[in-house]
Image: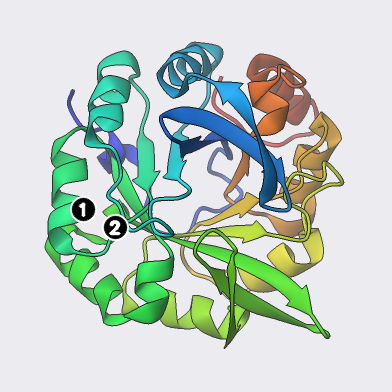
Amino acid sequence: MESSSLQTEVIKAGNDLAKRIIPCLDVKDGRTVKGVNFVALRDAGDPVELAYQYSRQGADELVFLDITATHERRKTIVELVKAVARQVNIPFTIGGGINEISDADILLNSGADKISVNSAVVRNPAFIDELALAFGKQFVVVAIDTKHINGKNYVHLNGGRIATEIETEDWIREAESRGAGEILLTSMDHDGTKAGFDNGLLKKINNTLSIPLIASGGAGNIQDFVDVFKISNADAALAASVFHYGEILIPDLKKVLQQNNIEVRI
């Protein structure tokens, strides 16, 4: 499949560019799963079938995260990437257990359009520089799991299992300076709660970024998407369970976004 990632703008998306809707598929043992606050996982279906359905519904991109790859020290399943690439014609990002340039190279050559890195680059920030140099910034998504503790936001690793003393905003600035093409920010406090995105944090961070910001964590209804775009001006909104269980259909979501003067691709 010919890569479509070059269609993705590396520069900061402005109000005149369409906002992106991105279903996220957390994959464990070859199945899509979803939890609340990163725990209590339950099955949500076959990832390849879900990817095909989202592509047909009008999703702009997809994100696949092998959520136990880093924790269990195994590599992301290349066969999944190949299967998805055969089924969809929209860009998709793959993450989980990417620790070396060779890991990313295999995934991109198997059909992924972008790679997502999280724990590995916190432990070795220079890895962002290496990835950007090897493949180009537009291929590098830095995913960050953040949690609010005692008035500050801190980075967490290994699928949220390990807390660090790194403040989220400091890490985002460093990731951008090293060559991240996009930031995928997940609020662990909001994740799976369906109580809405962390719009205050997202707005604060987005105001300092010159690269696209993908909002993640907390989507529960269509209004939450309207709010995150209007309040934070994020470039994309990512969600999982509301899509996986049919609570929100992407055509309905995009129709309402249009009605609220939020530009989307139909």
Q: Label 1 vs label 2: CA separation?
A: 6 Å
Between residues 220 and 159, which one lies in front from this camera angle?
Answer: 159
Among the 4 quarters of the image, the one containing residue 93 = top left
Q: Quadrant of the C terminus?
A: top right
Instruction: State which mark lies toward you, 1 or 2.
Output: 2
Mark 2 lies on a secondary structure that is loop
Is the residue 165 above or below the residue 261 in the image? below
As helix, strand or loop, the secondary structure at mark 1 comes to: helix
**Residue 141 relative to residue 6: left or right:** right
Using the image as rendered, state which of residue 14 and residue 67 is in the foreground.
Answer: 67
Circle 2 Cα neighbour tier, 10 Å, few/some/many (<14 / 14–19 / ≥20): many
The disc, 1 or 2, on the residue closer to the chain's N-terminal end is 2
- Residue at point 55%, 85% (across, down): 170
Measured as percent of width and height from the top left, residue 139 is found at: 28, 52
> What residue is shown with label 1?
104
Q: Quadrant of the N terminus?
A: top left
Taking the spot 14% from the left edge, 50% from the top edge, the residue there is: 105
Is the residue marked by circle 1 packed among few (<14), some (14-19), or many (20+) residues within 10 Å? many
* Disc assigned to residue 225: none
Does 11 sit left or right of 236 as displayed? left
Which colouring convention does the figure follow?
Answer: rainbow
Query: Hey, what amino acid is under mark 2?
Result: Ile
Query: Mark 1 belongs to which amino acid?
Result: Ala
Question: Could you tell me if residue 177 is visible in this image?
Answer: no
Residue 23 visible here? yes
Give residue 84's position: percent from left, percent from top: 32, 23
Which residue position is annotated with label 2? 98
Find out whether the residues at labels 1 and 2 contact each other: C-beta distance under 8 Å. Answer: yes
